[in-house]
Image (tube, rainbow, N blue to C red):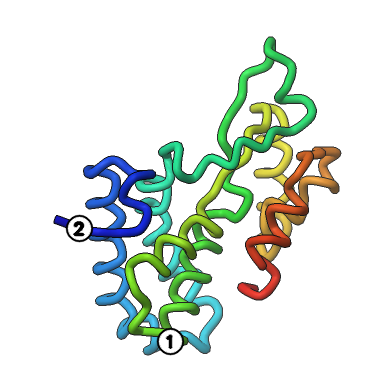
Amino acid sequence: MIYSKYSSDLKSKSLSKIYEHWKDMKCLLTRYREFKHDEEAVKNFCSRYRNPFFDISNIKFFKTGLKSEQSKDSSKKIVNDHFIQRIHGARIVFQELDKNSDMSFDCFLELLRKVCSTVSITVEEHNKVTNFVKRKNNLMNFEVYKECGIFVEGLDKFLENANISSLR
């Protein structure tokens, strides 16, 4: 039985998946450390491990409830957008594990909640963001929302409270 202070917020299956992801990432930390100073190698490495972030973050626990202005129109198709792309999220998690390889499971969950959370935006907005960050892939989605004319009420406060700027 896996225990976490978030056990009441997560179904047992989700908690188990995240726990296994934590264990996997701790094992992969040795590999990350081999090339952590080579940005291209880190990018390629993290790209391979971005899919588990999608698998584990597609649950209510990671939904902020924040919505873009356009997504409030019920006639539009909505997607849950990771305001930190999964590849950047993987890099941040490896960086934080590198600083604290004894990170507890609950601290890992808190970190994941910061880097894997989502906001609701329209499909059209998502396409704009995706196209923009393809040209400037060093930026995180939340950094280009304004550039794309997307306003998500409460996101700035969420980012501030989560202290996202300290994770760059």
| Crowd tier of the residue under label 1, counting other residues whose Cα lies within 10 Å: few below 14, some 14–19, many 20 or above | few
Residue reaching furthest to the top: 75
Quadrant in which the C terminus is drawn = bottom right
Q: Nearer the viewer, mark 1 or mark 2?
A: 2
Residue 138: percent from left, percent from top: 68, 65
37 relative to 156 in the view: left or right: left
Residue pushed farthest left? 1
Instruction: Give me the disc on residue 35.
Output: 1
The residue singled out by tag 2 in the image is 2
Q: Is residue 120 above or below residue 36?
A: above
Q: Give the percent coordinates (x, y) of residue 95.
A: 49, 79
User: Closer to the N terminus: mark 1 or mark 2?
Assistant: 2
User: Residue 34 sits in which quadrant?
Assistant: bottom left
The kind of residue on which mark 1 rests is Phe
Helix, strand or loop under label 2: loop
52 vs 166, nearest the viewer: 166
Q: Is residue 63 left or right of residue 125?
A: left
Is 165 on the left or on the right of 63, as rendered?
A: right
Q: Residues within 10 Å of mark 2 (few under 14, many from 20)?
A: few
Q: Position of residue 42 (x, y in %)?
A: 48, 76
- What residue is rendered at 61% in x and 24% in y? 78
Amino acid on which disc 2 is placed? Ile
On screen, residue 117 above or below 123? below
Local SS, label 1: loop
Q: Position of residue 38 (x, y in %)?
A: 52, 85
